[in-house]
Structures are given as structure tokens and as C-alpha cells.
Amino acid sequence: MPVELSFLAGLAVLFLVSIKYRVNAFIGLLLSALSIACLSQMPLADAITSITVGFGKTVASIGIVIILGVMLGKYLEESGGAKKMADLAIRTVGNRRSPLAMALCGYLVAIPVFSDVAFVILSPLAKAMSSRTKISLPVITVSLSAGLLATHVFVPPTPGPLAVAGLLDLDIGLVTLWGMFAALMMTMFGWFWAQFIMPRFVPSIVPQDPEAEVQDAKLPTGWAAFTALLTPMVLILAATTSAMLLKEDHPLRTVFAFIGNANIAMGIGVLVSIVVLGRSIGKQRVLKIMDDALPEAGAIIFITAAGGALGQVLKDSGAGDAVAELIAGSGIPFILVPFVVAALLKAIQGSGTVAVITAATLCLPLAERLNMSPMLIFLASGSGARMICHVNDSYFWVYTKMSGFDTAMGLRTLSASNWFMAMGGLFATWIASFFV
């Protein structure tokens, strides 16, 4: 079979097992890789080698970082640090601008904490803000979701962006900078839709008896929460900046290259979080979080590594080059390819992380052939992964149940907003294309 058709057939296998049989993404990615290898007539021994090499390289590049990133997020979650950051953001912006404040809260909190968990943490605060300001609850919750879902697909140490940085061999510091820019654009698009467009067709809902805001004397201070969050990000960005500004033999560049290595920086971040947040968590819980982080991170690592295996097969089989030539001759803007693939995957299997990883994996060989920056693949994939949010997405149900909405209201508010958010991410990608 021609390699172009083998690529399409492998993609069809991935979609089929996801839609009809609801097979785990790990198995689906491996089956897709094996299908492409066999259909493109790779020798079986070479196919197995490609799969194992791609799998191993990916684990080596991002395994430790993802484990430590999950651990850091759990410390911020368990200590109440995420809640403290949200409260500070609201105080800064003011009650009258509570939708914007909640959007910024989501933008900050979802960097270390999974978006589902972050919404659970901030939902009582959203209801209290709606009751206090008489601003419709859907406006506030959709604004909050815009921030939560944007950084979830764009900004390390969230596992999806970390994994894609490893798969595309991108500098994590640059991924963080461009990811924060794209996430901010996506957040602002989502907030604008919630604040100024959605109220035209969604009735106002203001809770009568909201849950009181949590006032816990054991919450960490604001500086402690932000120190835990920013430490690894600052170290990684320092390494990137020193590499651009300092000579190769400069001693400071050597120091920053070490402490700004993603593995080291995340490790330092975890240690700092234990020191500054440990009192709010308690010694026993600190140790328990370390254990809990391993199985949660393991699932993400394995799916990411399976994506690496698929990427290696695409490269070794020549399927990626063949499809790139077709795209180059078709006139289709290449940047729309990872966007559409990620959107389709998100619609099918519900996971933004899986959608970002898989779309980036599929499109990397095409970008190399077309001489296009992998950074644009990352940004376009993240934008597409935000395009569709519906009933197969766990966040959809967290959003509706915690807000007291039915399914129809969830579709009219959250699902509709994601289309606008995706356009914000795609707009940011277009801006980035002039610089990367």
C-alpha cells in the first residue's frame, strides 16, 4: 500500500478504536503505529525497533518532568495554595470585574493543577462571587473555565505541554513563553464571549444560597503559593535566557543550564513547595502525595510514550514525508492540519492532553518536510484541542454538576464557548508564525 494511504489508514484505526470500541489511548496509539508500519511494508523487525525506540526516547525526555509536575500540582491543591492565588487575583481586579478576575484565576491555577480539580476548588468561590455581584453564574463559570482550559493545553508544568515539548524537541522555556501568550489570548477570547456575547441568548442565573467562601486559617500565604508555582518556571526561563544572552563558556550560563534543566528545575520546585506549603499540608500528607503522584503521572507518561512510538514509525516508514508532499501541493495552509486533527481527537475521546500529544506526533514529520517550526505545531494543536468540549469530556460533567446546570445548559454555555476560545488560540498561532 502507498505510504500516503498507510498514514490515512493508521489514522482511521486510531479513530475507529477510540469511537466504536472506546479503547484506551495508549493501546490505540500503539495499534495505529503498528498499522502504519505494516501497511507501508516496513519489515516487522524494523517496525518493532521503531516503536520501542520512539517509546523509550519519549520516556527518557519527559518521564521525570511529568512525575514531578503532577507532584507539584498536588501540593498546591492539597495545601489550599491554588485557592489562595484565586482569592488574590479577585482582590486585585475587584468584585465588579469578577468574570475577568475568575478568568485570570483559572489562567494561574490551572498551570499546576488539573483543570477538573481546579474547577472543583474554585466553584464555591464562583457561586459566592455571582451572589455578591448579581452577575449571572454562567458568565462567571465560563470565564473561569476559559482560563482553566487554556493553560491546561498550553503551559508547562501541565503534562500535555510538557509531553509535546519533549516529542517536538522544543526548549521548555520557549514553550512556556509562547504557551503563556497563547493561553492568555485564548482566555481573553473566552472571557469576552462569556461577558458580552453569551448573555444575549443564555438567561441570567444568580444563586440564592451560595456556598460561603472558604476561610481557612491554615491556608498558606500568597507569597508561599506563588513561590511554589513560579520557582520551576523562573529557573527554566533563566536557562533559556542565559543561553541566548551569554557566551557559551560563561560560568553563569553553565549554572543556569544545570538548575534550569527541566528535570532539575521541577525537582527544585517540588522541594520548595514542600518547604513553603508543608505546614499547611502536614508531614504525613506530604509523604502520601508523593506516593499518589506516581500512578497518576504513569498513565500520562505511557500515553505520551505511545505517541512517541507513533511519531518514530511515521518518520522511519516515510509516511510523514509522503503526506507532507501532498499537503504542500494541495494549497491547504499547513497550520490548519494539527488544529483540525486535535479538534477531531478531542471530540472523539474527550481528553485535551491526548489530543494535543497525538496531533503533534502525527504532524511533526510533516513540518520537518515542509521546513516549518515545530512551535507552530504545538500552538495549533493546543488550539484545536480546545475546539470541542461535550459529554465525553470529564470537565464538562464537573462543570455542570458543580454549577447546578443540566446538560443542555452545559452545551449552551461551556461547549459553545470552546469554539470561541479555539479561535483565540489560532489567532495567537498566527501571530507567532511571524516570529518563530
Image (tube, rainbow, N blue to C red):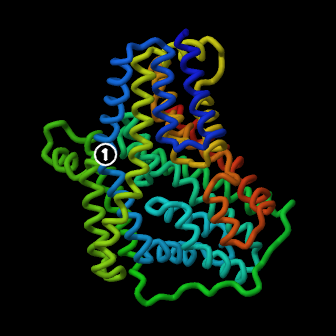
In front of the other: 243 or 164:
164
Relative side of 258 to 206, left or right: left
Q: Residue at x 58, y 56 (%)?
A: 149
Left or right: where does residue 48 sit relative to residue 13? Answer: left
Residues 340 and 226: in front is: 340
> For this rendering, which residue is in front, 117 or 249?
117
Q: Secondary structure at mark 1?
A: helix
Q: Amino acid at mark 1?
A: Thr
The number of numbered badges drawn on the structure is 1
For disc 1, the marked residue is 241
The location of residue 352, given as percent across then percent down, is 56, 48
Q: Quadrant of residue 306 in the image?
A: top left
The quarter in which the N terminus is drawn is top right
User: Vertically, is 132 above or below 199?
Assistant: below
Q: Is residue 55 left or right of residue 203?
A: left
> Residue 23 at what x, y percent from top left?
56, 42
Residue depicted at 65% across the width and 37% down the height: 344
Residue that appears at 77% across and 61% down: 407
Where residue 388 appears, as percent x and y from the top left, is: 68, 47
* Residue 426 shows in the view: no
Residue projecting furthest to the front: 21
Seen in the image, is 36 located left or right of residue 204? left
Residue 325 showing in the rendered view: yes
Q: Position of residue 323 (x, y in %)?
A: 55, 16
The crowd level at tag 1 (other Cα within 10 Å; few <14, some 14-19, many 20+) is some
* Residue furthest to the top: 2
Q: Residue at x 40, y 34 (%)?
A: 308
